[in-house]
Amino acid sequence: MGLFDIFRSKKKSKEDREARLRERGLIWEELTEEEREEFRKVLEVYGEDLYKHKPEEARFFKKDTMPMVIFTSPEGNQTEICLTKITPEQFAAGMQNLEEHRKKQEEMNNKNPSEVTEDYWLYASNKANKKYYAEMSDDCGKWMIFAEKGKKLDAIWKEVKQLTEKGLLVDSCKVSTNKDNPNSSNFKNGVICIYTYDVNDKADLMRAAEVLFGIKEVVYLCYKTDRATIGGKYANKGDKKISTYAVTKDNYKEKLS
């Protein structure tokens, strides 16, 4: 669960949210309740700009007794926000920008991955009444399908997207687009990420894998935890044994039993 999801989650208690923030080194205790509420507004106003950074890049600090939050990417790019400078006009403008971004994202999500170059990812979510997961655990992760960009990736994504939206797979998934991602080890291939709530629930992993292997073009799956992603483990950086599981249509039941 990312920083933004911590604040937006209605199922998390106040104590749990604060504990998760402490895990990320955020000095939540040093903020007053008024400052905390203001920070929630900051997320709503600047949320999409902050999403350019990863949640683990966030740090609270005090500058001349002024509460601040700063995001620093590995490349050194920073977004710094003072928590006491949110005007009603900024708040209104920020909310409007968020709404425009959501509409733009919805339009993009209706396209094939091969047609999109302005963003790294397209998304799909469970639109059925019943959700699979009440919440994601700290050991959550995703099944990953790698395929050549173009017709093959488009075809697999179409089926994964339909299964997800119909409530037959998981609650959320995403696919890489034709915009080259610096974390990719092969720009000719794309990846589809199918999120599950806990790597330790082998029965759930097997259930999702069985659905995915029902897609004709899917013959191989890798499972990567979010801990590995947050830890910056990528093949293009020379990291080995990144996947918790690597399974085929013939052996997944055995490996997950």
Image (cartoon, rainbow, N blue to C red):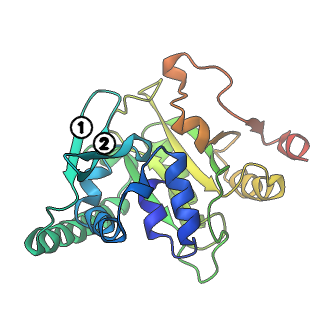
Q: Mark 2 sits on what residue?
A: 71
Q: Please state the horizontal and vertical placement of residue 136, each as a whole percent of the image.
A: 62, 60
Hey, what amino acid is under mark 1?
Gln
- Say whether residue 162 is left or right of residue 62: right
How many other residues sit within 10 Å of disc 1, few (<14), some (14-19) or many (≥20)? some
Q: How many neighbours does mark 2 have within 10 angstroms: few (below 14), some (14-19), or many (20 or more)?
A: many
Q: CA distance from mark 2 to mark 1?
A: 5 Å
Residue in the foreground of this view, choosing between 186 and 114: 186
Sequence-wise, the earlier of marks 2 and 1 is 2
Establish if 39 lies above or below 157. below
Q: Is residue 212 visible?
A: yes
Q: Quadrant of residue 169?
A: bottom right
Q: How many marks?
A: 2
What residue appears at the point 64 percent right and 20 percent down from the top-left corner?
Answer: 240
> Which amino acid is tagged 2?
Phe
Q: Secondary structure at mark 2?
A: strand
Q: Quadrant of the N terminus?
A: bottom right
Question: Is any part of residue 1 visible from this angle?
Answer: no
Compared with 53, 97 (above or below) is below
Residue 34 is left or right of residue 222, and the answer is left
Q: Are marks 2 and 1 in contact (CB under 8 Å)?
A: yes
SS at badge 1 = strand
x then y, percent, for residue 92: 14, 75
Circle number at residue 78: 1
Specify whether 130 is left or right of 39.
right
Residue 168 appears in which quarter of the rendering? bottom right
x then y, percent, for residue 151: 45, 43
Left/right of residue 81 with respect to residue 169 in the rendered view = left
Residue extending farthest top: 238
> Residue at left 12%, top 75%?
88
